Amino acid sequence: MRKTIFTFLALAALLTMGACNDYETYGELKEKERDNIEKFISDSSYVIIGEDQFREQGNLTVGDKQFVYLSKSGVYMQIVRQGCGEKIKDGESLSVICRFEEVSIQDTARMQNTRYYVFDPDIMNVTRNGSTYSATFVSGLMLSAYGATVPEGWLVPLQYVNVGRPMSPDDEIARVKLIVPHSQGTTNNAKANVRPYYYDITFQRGR
């Protein structure tokens, strides 16, 4: 009987040790996230610049490989097109039409409304108060997948790009590419699972 109890306790201890070994701490998950981001940047041959160089370039990135690392948010940003029109004014609230591609850097899972949902874009209501931008999704894939809260990472580019509507054939809407750490991502996915995401987003002023 004593031998049976000892065997049971030993087995229970082994199972507990295995469960502990399978558990990843928040620090370990953050380290894995950093590794995934670094690998994504390396595999994509992206060139990362600092904010001083970014300012010297007129708050723009150059070419299709350059990203600026924004230290306050931890977001990496490439401005593909600065966009027509003007920046969102302080105190202004407006509707912004977005088309996007989302890629999980960890497992390459993909979601987009750029190809199959061209006529059904995401729409968010944005308000600027000083240097603070807040927003909620009111329709689209992001609302369906993650709820109304707009990830902070999506709002980072708004201080650098124009959000207008094309008025001539030469006008182009703003487009950015982002590498968004979990802390600036969706609440119930990126933040909850410590997952970084890549985004390709356009911004257009609503009517």
Image (cartoon, rainbow, N blue to C red):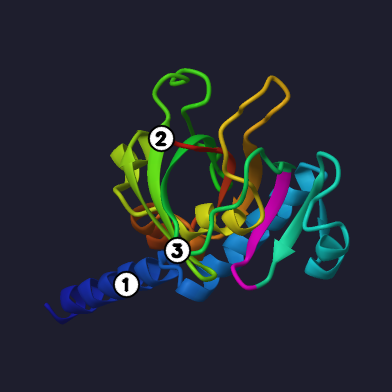
Closer to the camera in the image, 19 or 204: 204
> The magenta stretch spans which residues?
72-79
Q: 154 left or right of 4?
A: right
Disc 2 residue type? Asp
Q: Position of residue 203 (x, y in %)?
A: 55, 40
- In space, the residues marked 3 and 1 are separated at their CA atoms by 55 Å
Q: Position of residue 11 (x, y in %)?
A: 28, 69
First reached walking from the N terminus: tag 1 or tag 2: 1
Residue 189 falls inside the magenta stretch: no
Q: Nearer the viewer, mark 1 or mark 2?
A: 2
Can you say which quadrant of the picture contains the C terminus?
top left
What is the magenta segment's predominant secondary structure? Answer: strand
Q: Badge 2 is on which residue?
A: 122
Q: Badge 3 is on which residue?
A: 91
Can you say which quadrant of the picture contains the N terminus?
bottom left
First reached walking from the N terminus: tag 2 or tag 3: 3
Disc 3 residue type? Gly
Q: Nearer the viewer, mark 3 or mark 1?
A: 3
Considering the numbered disc 2 on the image, is that residue within a helix, a strand or a loop? strand
Closer to the camera in the image, 105 or 150: 150
- In space, the residues marked 2 and 3 are separated at their CA atoms by 23 Å
Residue reaching furthest to the bottom: 2
**Which circle marks residue 16 in the picture?**
1
**Which circle marks residue 90 in the picture?**
none
Q: 175 left or right of 135?
A: right
Q: Nearer the viewer, mark 2 or mark 3?
A: 3
Q: Position of residue 166 (x, y in %)?
A: 61, 28
